[in-house]
Image: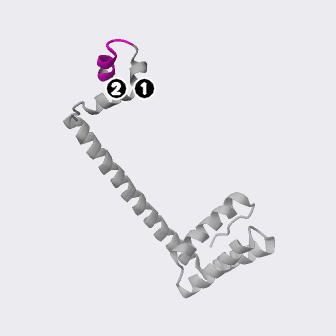
């Protein structure tokens, strides 16, 4: 701002701000960053990286918790939910089939992360988009 005031000689700063020659002069100006500015910039990038790390850890923990939850519920439970979904024609055929396949995976103890994510979304849809009451174990 001080630079524009100097260049405009207390005139209309906007007029000078749009001129190419003004910005060429500005490029020649020495730029000094205060220690506080540099410290804030470094802290900010560190905080962002730390936040990303915590977010990744939280997602990992949630995925692990959900895997354990579905494994604890068991294949019989998932089959019962599948049969209810099929009988009541709830959600899409693909969602119903996903629950059936996940039940098979739980029975074989081979439930993948992708299947956990799919089951979680399906159960959220069952809860929010239908009147179906998800049974207790």
Report the residue that reaches farthest toward the left. 35
Q: Residues within 10 Å of mark 2 (few under 14, many from 20)?
A: some
**111 up-or-down from 58: above or below:** below
| In the displayed structure image, the side of residue 107 where residue 50 appears, left or right | left
In the picture, residue 52 is in which quadrant? bottom left
Asked which secondary structure carries label 1, the reply is: loop
Answer whether labels 2 and 1 touch (C-beta < 8 Å).
yes
- Please name the residue that numbered disc 2 is placed on: 22
| In the displayed structure image, the side of residue 37 where residue 132 appears, left or right | right
Q: Residue at x 28, y 42 (%)?
A: 41
In the rendered image, residue 120 lying in the magenta stretch gets the answer no
- Res. 6 mark: none
Q: Residue at x 62, y 73 (%)?
A: 137
In-front residue for pair 90/34: 34
Q: Residue at x 58, y 86 (%)?
A: 107
**13 up-or-down from 21: above or below:** above
* Residue 33 picture location, percent across and down: 22, 35
* Residue 50 picture location, percent across and down: 33, 54
* Residue 94 picture location, percent across and down: 71, 74
Q: Residues within 10 Å of mark 1 (few under 14, many from 20)?
A: few
In-front residue for pair 6/87: 6
- Which span is picked out in magenta? 3-11
**What is the CA distance from the residue labelled 2 to the residue labelled 1?**
8 Å
Q: Main secondary structure of the magenta part?
A: helix
**102 up-or-down from 126: above or below:** below
Report the residue that reaches farthest toward the top. 10
Q: Residue at x 52, y 85 (%)?
A: 109
- Please name the residue that numbered disc 1 is placed on: 18
* Residue 12 picture location, percent across and down: 40, 14
């Amino acid at each position: 701002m001080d630079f524009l005031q100097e260049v405009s000689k207390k005139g209309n700063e906007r007029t000078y701000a749009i001129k190419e020659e003004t910005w060429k002069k500005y490029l020649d100006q020495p730029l000094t960053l205060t220690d506080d500015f540099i410290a804030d910039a470094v802290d900010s990038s560190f905080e962002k990286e730390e936040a990303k790390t915590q977010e990744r850890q939280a997602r990992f923990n949630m995925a692990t918790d959900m895997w354990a939850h579905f494994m604890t519920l068991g294949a019989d439970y998932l089959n019962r939910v599948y049969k209810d979904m099929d009988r009541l024609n709830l959600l899409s055929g693909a969602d119903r089939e996903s629950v059936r396949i996940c039940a098979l995976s739980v029975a074989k103890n081979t439930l993948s992360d992708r299947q956990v994510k799919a089951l979680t979304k399906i159960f959220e849809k069952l809860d929010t988009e239908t009147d179906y009451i998800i049974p207790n174990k």
